[in-house]
Image (spheres, rainbow, N blue to C red):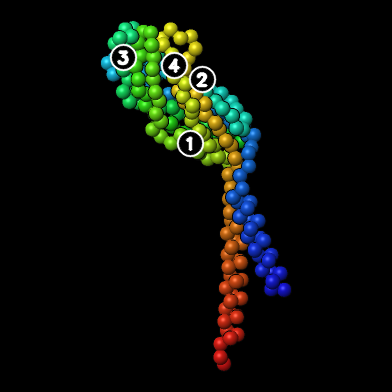
Amino acid sequence: MRKHAQRLAVLAVALCLLGAGQARADFTPWDYNWTPSASVLQSDVPGQASILFSNEPGGSAQGTTSVVAANLKTSSSAAPSAPGTFTNAPYSLSLAIFDKASGKAGNLTFSGTLNGAVSSGSSILMNTYTTPETQSVQVGNHVYSVKIGPFAPPGPPSATISGSISATATVTVADAPEPSALVLAGMGVSLFGGWWYKRGRRRGLAVEPA
């Protein structure tokens, strides 16, 4: 009888912990909007060259998806022999998330720097992220895990197709642990621990000399 009760207690604890820790993919609808910290980044010597940021208008998604964070174009009248340079030019991209199921919102911010040179006929730019490339935020009962990247450098000012900085963000939506499951798990551990303690105490008393 005791072995049966012990097995039931262990099973109850395991089921509670499994239910609390398990995450699953979900197709919950959500809205998003990227906002750059500035619409224009100036070269080290202002007026020689600039990098223009533009974000996609707010969009809607469902579950895991890739989204465009910002587009990039260059502008310069400097000669290729004397381009405008960018030295650790800082930028940031803020992502606003609206969870439709709960009606709540969350935010994530990714930062980086640009280094390189831009002229009227050339563009060489490199990107370095200065914050973690993967960040997460819980909004309502969902956890949004966002990975920034990759970076597609923009061409010279004459290019018709924009480059992209932090071009793709992969969003993973998973159910967060239910508080009730965590409570049940704690109760299961407490009950099992109490039962085991009493059992051990009875055993200890049984072998003590009279």
Farthest residue to the left: give it: 45
Quadrant position of the N terminus in the picture: bottom right
Earlier in the chain: of badge 2 and badge 3, it is 2
State the residue position of label 2.
56
Mark 1 or 3: the one toward you: 3
Secondary-structure class at tag 2 = loop
Q: Amino acid at mark 2?
A: Glu
Disc 1 from disc 2: Cα separation:
20 Å
State the residue position of label 4.
154
Res. 35 image quadrant: top left
Disc 2 from disc 3: Cα separation:
27 Å
Point out which mark residue 134 bears: 1
The residue under the point 39% across, 23% down is: 126
Secondary-structure class at tag 1 = strand
Disc 4 from disc 3: Cα separation:
15 Å
Mark 2 or 4: the one toward you: 4
Earlier in the chain: of badge 1 and badge 3, it is 3
State the residue position of label 3.
84
Secondary-structure class at tag 4 = loop
Earlier in the chain: of badge 2 and badge 4, it is 2
Q: Amino acid at mark 3?
A: Gly
Relative placement, left or right, of 191 versus 150 is right
Q: Are marks 1 and 4 in contact (CB under 8 Å)?
A: no
115 shown above or below 11: above
The residue under the point 63% across, 56% down is: 16
67 shown above or below 45: below
